[in-house]
Image: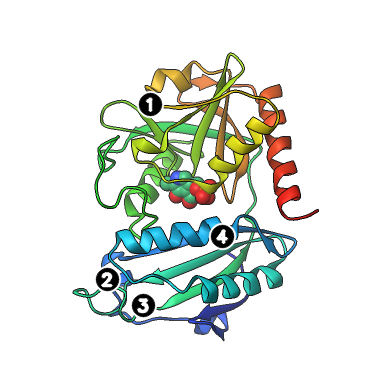
Amino acid sequence: MAVVGSVLIDGEPFAPEDASISVFDIGFQRGYGCFEAMRSYEGSIFRLDAHLERLARSAAKLHMPEPDREAIGTWCRSAAATAGDGVVRAFISGGTDAKAPGTNSRIVVFAESVPPMPDALALQTGVAPWHTDGEWFELTGAKGLSYGFNLVASLVAVQAGFDDALLIGRRGHVLEGPTFSIGWISNGVFHTPAIEIGILESITRRAVIDAAGGIGMTVREGIYNVEAVMDAEEVVAMSTVREVLPVAKIDLQTYQPGPATSRLKQAFTGLVERELGR
Ligand SMILES: Cc1ncc(COP(=O)(O)O)c(C=O)c1O
């Protein structure tokens, strides 16, 4: 991780090595709080409002007060301006009162350089027993700080020689990656798991759906068994950090990043450029 510029804590700048919050914060003690990762292109954040809205939804699901979107937006824009092309991260800690989360939250914002990315990903499927696989519960869709399960899933896949994991629900449905959404092309149609299955409402996934619509590609959001992705012609991972990244392998099955992936990537890049006024 390479931090670019200062770390803002409640808007106050600190050198990265001096940036810290309390060990009594339930963000640290219990993984309680929420966060966002945003992509900045030449100093402008893609879909900042959507990120701030998702942050507010996550805070509400965690019974925390409504965050000050204007202040956080200003801090994020400032971090982006320093970073240029980068990843801007915003965290709201739970604060130090477990009985009243958010009463003294700390808000941390900083930018990182974009990490190097492989040309294509090799994914290992893994069952995610902690995921509800379609059953709604209070925290469904919240981007909370408790990412331990997802991080371990990635590590297990990396230890097995893959780049990352592809999470499968207890009922056998394709969900998402630990930090990305998944989509695939079958018979010229772009498929991606529906939000209703309980996956994160990914901002990149939404943008790719918009971009696919813009080039006349049919999009289907649904509940799919793992075979649907296994039998696909082309597969892509989607996230703020990865944008649209081809998947070359899932378990033993290989895929060729083909023409549909190129069209989707191009359409996504075009959409980003248009929305950012380039
Ligand atoms: C579980 C999960 N799914 C999907 C995504 C992709 O979301 P976004 O496109 O908003 O970055 C992320 C991003 O971190 C994630 O953690």
Q: Which is more N-terminal, label 1 or label 3?
A: 3
Name above or below for residue 248 compared with residue 44.
Answer: above
Amino acid type indicated by mark 2:
Gln
The answer to whether any part of residue 179 appears in the image is no
Image point (29%, 41%), residue name: 131
Number of the label disc, if any, that sits on residue 105: 3
Q: Which is more N-terminal, label 2 or label 1?
A: 2
Q: Is residue 133 left or right of residue 10?
A: left
Name above or below for residue 59 compared with residue 261.
Answer: below
Q: Are marks 4 and 2 in contact (CB under 8 Å)?
A: no
- Who is closer to the viewer here, 251 or 29? 29
Q: Are marks 3 and 4 in contact (CB under 8 Å)?
A: no
> Badge 2 is on which residue?
29
> Badge 4 is on which residue?
49
> Badge 1 is on which residue?
223
Q: CA distance from mark 4 to mark 2?
A: 30 Å
Circle 2: element type: helix
Circle 1: element type: loop
Amino acid type indicated by mark 3:
Ser
Figure quadrant of residue 234:
top right
